[in-house]
Amino acid sequence: MARGDAGGSGGDGDAGHSGAAERAQFTDDEQRAMREAFAAGGVVLCPRCDAAMTVRAIGGGSFGLGYARQRHWLMCPRCHRSAMFDVKRGTRN
């Protein structure tokens, strides 16, 4: 019974879980700040836990298609959240 009360369809059950700190995905503003910090050449800090993000370049493209996406994957070693964005366009994907 206690389990059903905590996550039921009532309105108050999710009230404490709507903040950005509880979301697994970074917000658009957080991702924008990470991209800007990366583009400036500085160390990118996780907006949730302030750990230095690990950067992994991801080459892409298919042979013969005429385009190649170059992406960077920013990963937090502490809270394990990540964000990926295209290098040239500066967009998130």
Image (tube, rainbow, N blue to C red):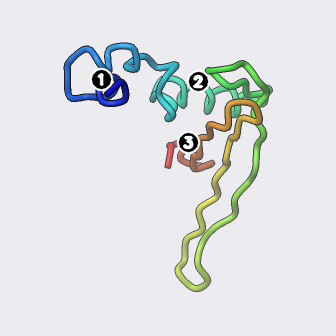
User: Which numbered disc flags the more N-terminal residue, 2 or 1?
Assistant: 1
Element assignment for label 1:
helix
Question: Which element type, helix, strand or loop, lies under badge 2?
Answer: helix
Task: Give the residue type at disc 1.
Answer: Asp
Q: Position of residue 19 (x, y in %)?
A: 42, 16
CB under 8 Å between discs 3 and 1? no
Q: Earlier in the sequence, mark 3 or mark 1?
A: 1
Viewer-side label of 2, 1: 1
Q: Residue at x 52, y 19 (%)?
A: 21
Residue located 63% across and 29% down the image = 34
Q: Amino acid at mark 2?
A: Ala
Q: Which image quarter is the N terminus in? A: top left
- Label 3, on which residue? 90
Residue carrying label 1: 5
Q: Determine the CA span between mark 2 and mark 3.
A: 11 Å
Q: Quadrant of residue 90?
A: top right
Tell which of 71 and 45 is nearer to you. Answer: 45
Residue extending furthest toward the bottom: 64
Residue 68 pos. (x, y %): 60, 68
Q: Give the x, y percent position of residue 26.
A: 51, 31
Residue receiving disc 2:
33
58 sits left or right of 22 in the view? right
